[in-house]
């Protein structure tokens, strides 16, 4: 009686994590060092408005230069909007904790080497999937803050609407869209590519210079919506790995996790493609 040979095992090299055209790359991050207190974790981050004020906060002087104060109409006064109508700061941005799991469960084999392999797999899963999960959760905040989207016949009209809305604020920002629209935007010449480095594309911009954020996690929540925001800022800690050996089940569990907040000062506008 002969025994069949076992198959040859092969472990491929780790895939390089990181989608360079998504939210993670577009966000300016503050990373807490290991051991630092995460003051933003319990109640989130409150963004204070500085650049995106209510339109009544500015105007054009229309009265004669030497007019008597008694001859001024109420509309001539540089009074700004009523106090009750001041734009409130956006609601606080709350933290989310994203995690990845791996398990080692082999009969009698919980060696240091094999436990290390489980930790490596958990870290790799987190590196690949964590940013996508953050985008999906962030999209729920985008949709909550966005006004009713303006209907657009096609992608060109949608981008044009958002660029016009940005222009009214006098600022540049981000346009968030699902990855599935990238090829169409390229085909329609709605993408200007900044120089990149070998293997990593440069920043993608609209014809007016706003940064595209093509999020893999935006596919389901945004669909054919495009949403414009001011630049995004993020807070996060280092990736931590929690390990435990469950002797009664002869298994080793590794969980890689970190807490994250992504925030913006203002949501500029929204458009939806409705051909």
Image (tube, rainbow, N blue to C red):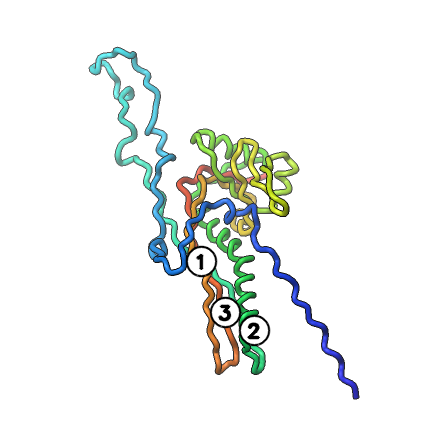
Q: Answer few, some or many: residues within 10 Å of disc 3's Cα (few below 14, many 20 plus, some between 14 and 19).
A: many
* 3D distance between C-alphas at marks 3 and 2: 14 Å
* 3D distance between C-alphas at marks 3 and 1: 16 Å
- Marks 3 and 2, the one that precedes in the sequence: 2
Name the secondary structure under disc 3.
strand
- Marks 3 and 1, the one that precedes in the sequence: 1
Q: Is residue 136 left or right of residue 2?
A: left
* 3D distance between C-alphas at marks 2 and 1: 24 Å
Q: Which residue is mark 1?
A: 238
Q: Is residue 168 above or below residue 182?
A: above
Name the mark nearer the viewer: 3 or 2.
2
Q: Which residue is mark 2?
A: 113
Q: Answer few, some or many: residues within 10 Å of disc 1's Cα (few below 14, many 20 plus, some between 14 and 19).
A: some
In percent of the image, x 52 and y 36: which residue is there? 210
Label of residue 254 in the image: 3
Q: Answer few, some or many: residues within 10 Å of disc 2's Cα (few below 14, many 20 plus, some between 14 and 19).
A: few
| Res 84 → quadrant | top left
Q: Looking at the figure, which quarter contains the N terminus?
A: bottom right
| Res 55 → quadrant | top left
Name the mark nearer the viewer: 2 or 1.
2
């Amino acid at each position: 009686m002969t025994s069949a040979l076992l198959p040859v095992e092969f472990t491929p090299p780790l895939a390089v994590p990181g989608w360079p055209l998504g939210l993670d790359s577009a966000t300016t991050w503050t990373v807490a060092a290991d051991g630092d207190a995460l003051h933003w974790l319990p109640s989130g981050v409150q963004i204070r408005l500085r650049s995106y004020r209510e339109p009544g906060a500015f105007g054009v002087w229309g009265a004669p230069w030497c007019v008597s104060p008694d001859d001024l109409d109420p509309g001539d006064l540089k009074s700004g909007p009523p106090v009750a109508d001041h734009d409130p700061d956006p609601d606080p941005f709350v933290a989310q904790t994203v995690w990845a799991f791996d398990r080692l469960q082999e009969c009698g084999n919980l060696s240091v080497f094999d436990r290390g392999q489980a930790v490596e797999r958990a870290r790799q899963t987190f590196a690949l999937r964590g940013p996508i999960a953050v985008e999906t959760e962030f999209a729920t905040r985008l949709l909550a803050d966005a006004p009713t989207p303006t209907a657009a016949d096609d992608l060109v009209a949608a981008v044009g609407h958002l660029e016009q809305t940005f222009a009214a604020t006098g600022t540049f920002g981000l346009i968030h869209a699902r990855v599935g629209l990238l090829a169409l935007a390229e085909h329609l010449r709605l993408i200007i590519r900044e120089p990149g480095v070998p293997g990593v594309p440069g920043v993608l911009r609209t014809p007016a210079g706003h940064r595209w954020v093509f999020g893999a996690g935006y596919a389901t929540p945004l669909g054919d919506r495009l949403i414009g925001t001011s630049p995004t800022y993020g807070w996060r800690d280092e990736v931590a790995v929690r390990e435990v050996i469950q002797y009664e089940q002869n298994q080793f569990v590794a969980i890689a996790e970190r807490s994250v907040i992504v925030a913006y000062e203002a949501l500029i506008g929204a458009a939806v493609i409705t051909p």
